[in-house]
Amino acid sequence: MTKKRLVVLSSILIAFSMLLGACGGGKTAGPVKIQIFVGIGTGDAPEQVALHKTLQDEFNASHTDIQIEFLTTLNAEARTKFQTMLASGQPPDLVMPIGIEGVANFQDEWLDISQLVKDDNYDMSDFNAAPVAGESFFGLPIGIYPSVLYYNTDLYDAAGVAYPPHTFGTAGWTYDALIADAQKLTLDANGNNAASASFDPANIVQFGWDGWDWFGSSDSIMKFGGNLKGISTDFKKAELTTKPVVDAFQFEYDTVWKYYVRPNGEQVGALFADDPMSPGIVAAWEIQSWIEYAYPTWNEAFNWDVAAIPSINGKIVAEADFDIFTITKSSQHPKEAWEVAKWLIEPAQMSRLAPSYGCIPSRKSLAATWMADKQAAYPNVDWQVVIDAMGYADFPINHEGWTPAFNQVVDAYTNVEQSILASKDANVTELLTAANEEIQGYLNQYWEAKK
């Protein structure tokens, strides 16, 4: 072969290799694109979408190797959309914010980031509720939503009932004491309270307490000393007929049908379009601080404050929700996704994200600023109670934590809850016995499939 032909052939090969590179046959040019899926938790409100867009623009303007895009889906549609993306082989890289329940729904889809944290020597000391170093985990907390007892001070004043304690562990502050107060705060149409012999439970116009959250005792079994969702610690045995589980659901039944301090299912449907406190006819409610979106409505209708969670059998559990980020294990760019996540939970970004999500920023260094902002916006509320509640959070075992057959277990408990709220004739023991058999079947199926 002549020298001239060699030169021509070399030129052709070089041109061909360049063409392959341009068509994707070689290393892709340009920055890595990281897609952030929003909607499984909070994040789809217009002001939250606007903030995400601002952060997206800031990140993209300051980085050349990575670019980000927030993909926002309405919460009601988010799980289906996420499953579709996974099934089509086009998973997002990051999912945020996502709560513990959302994580549990898709337990097998997340990347264990503990090795990324270790390789990066990432400092977790500034985080409340940080994972334990050396153990596997899916993400770091963006924010924490502690639960407290919200109460309508106007209704307490009108009834002449002393406000509930603001200090956790106050002697005598138990759920029995809460119910005793709630009976005095529950009124029928003639103004008789639920502690009165003349009280008419068929014509209640004001309730003393609306329980905890919108959910039921399945999320509060640990308050009564039971295991998560009433399942053994190895997740193989249903324990719904044990004393802590029965006590939890019997207590819920009694608040509705014995003490009449909490609305039943029919009353809820008739009286509450949104959260139970907004109409101004519920004196107290135990809920996580993500209810912040309702604060302005409450402010317009009544005066309110927050108090400590009562104890049960000497134990205080202030159930907390968490928002974290997760990286999909099917992401094509996990290391770049980790870099994006780190940027989003830096103090400068977290200090904007947490207020938008209605949570306490998970970084300890931001707590004072959070407190100052809340006191400025709502000066009559004792925000120290919310900070103190973090010391009683259900962590690391959380009420929304994973169990085998997670959705089926939750549905079974929901059916028990709805049956209790629907009828005074509901038999708690019988309902739980039937649900125990049902859930045991789900557990057996799960572990059999793992063999």
Image (spheres, grey):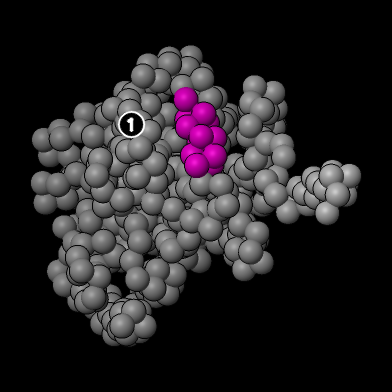
Tell me the quarter of the image containing the N terminus: bottom right
Q: Residue 307 location in percent, x, y? A: 30, 33
* Predominant SS along the magenta part: helix
342 magenta-colored: yes
Q: Amino acid at mark 1?
A: Asn
Q: Which residues are magenta?
A: 335-346
Residue picked out by circle 1: 121
Q: Quadrant of residue 369?
A: top left
* Whether residue 21 is situated above or below residue 251 in the rendered picture: above
Q: Quadrant of residue 90?
A: bottom right
Between 404 and 121, the residue placed more toward the observer is 121
Q: Residue 236 location in percent, x, y? A: 23, 75
Residue 152 is left or right of residue 27, and the answer is: left
135 magenta-colored: no
Residue at 43% x, 63% y: name it.
Answer: 108
Q: Residue 414 location in percent, x, y? A: 42, 69
Residue 152 is left or right of residue 225, and the answer is: right
Residue 11 is left or right of residue 271, and the answer is: right
Residue at 26% x, 48% y: name it.
Answer: 135
